[in-house]
Amino acid sequence: MMKRVITYGTFDLLHYGHINLLRRAKALGDYLVVALSSDEFNWKEKGKKCYFTYDQRKTLLESIRYVDLVIPETCWDQKARDVHEYHIDVFVIGDDWKGRFDFLKDEGVEVVYLPRTPEVSTTQIKNDLHQPR
């Protein structure tokens, strides 16, 4: 039986930390769904302004071999609905969210918090680009 995995994120300024997360998420199953934060959700709920638009970020994600399907993330509380709609077996997210999504276990889903790639983040990249060399 096919094991389906889902992860969530903004994936702006795609870097090898993102690829690392996607690779490890895909390794937990056979089919990886990525819920990509919409521009509106990023701005209104997360206070983040993206460099790339949703469509551009979606195109980048779809070109990665570990990703099977990209869907929009438009609100915080869609996760329980998504795990049922997409028949998800494993929910994966970075370990900076540890404990926050344990409630999904009640939906019959395995919840995995993956360690971030320590030396890279989009925020760090943005900050480094503003520093004189």
Image (tube, helix red, strand yellow):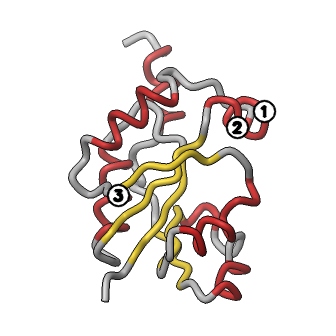
- The answer to whether marks 1 and 3 mark residues whose Cβ atoms lie closer than 8 Å is no
Local secondary structure at mark 2: helix
Farthest left residue in view:
65
For residue 16, side relative to residue 69 (left or right): left
Mark 1 or mark 3, earlier in chain: 3
Q: CA distance from mark 3 to mark 2?
A: 21 Å
Q: Is residue 127 above or below residue 94?
A: above
Mark 2 residue crowding within 10 angstroms, few (<14) / some (14–19) / many (20+):
some
The amino acid pointed to by label 3 is Leu
The amino acid pointed to by label 1 is Lys
In the rendering, at what x and y percent does residue 22 appear?
35, 58
Q: Which mark is residue 44?
A: 1
Q: Which residue is mark 3?
A: 22
Q: Who's the residue at 53% across and 64% down the image?
A: 93
- The answer to whether marks 1 and 2 mark residues whose Cβ atoms lie closer than 8 Å is yes
Mark 1 residue crowding within 10 angstroms, few (<14) / some (14–19) / many (20+):
few
Q: Who's the residue at 39% across and 47% down the image?
A: 119
Mark 3 or mark 2, earlier in chain: 3
Local secondary structure at mark 3: helix
The amino acid pointed to by label 2 is Phe
* Residue 4 lies in quadrant: bottom left
Q: Which residue is mark 2?
A: 41
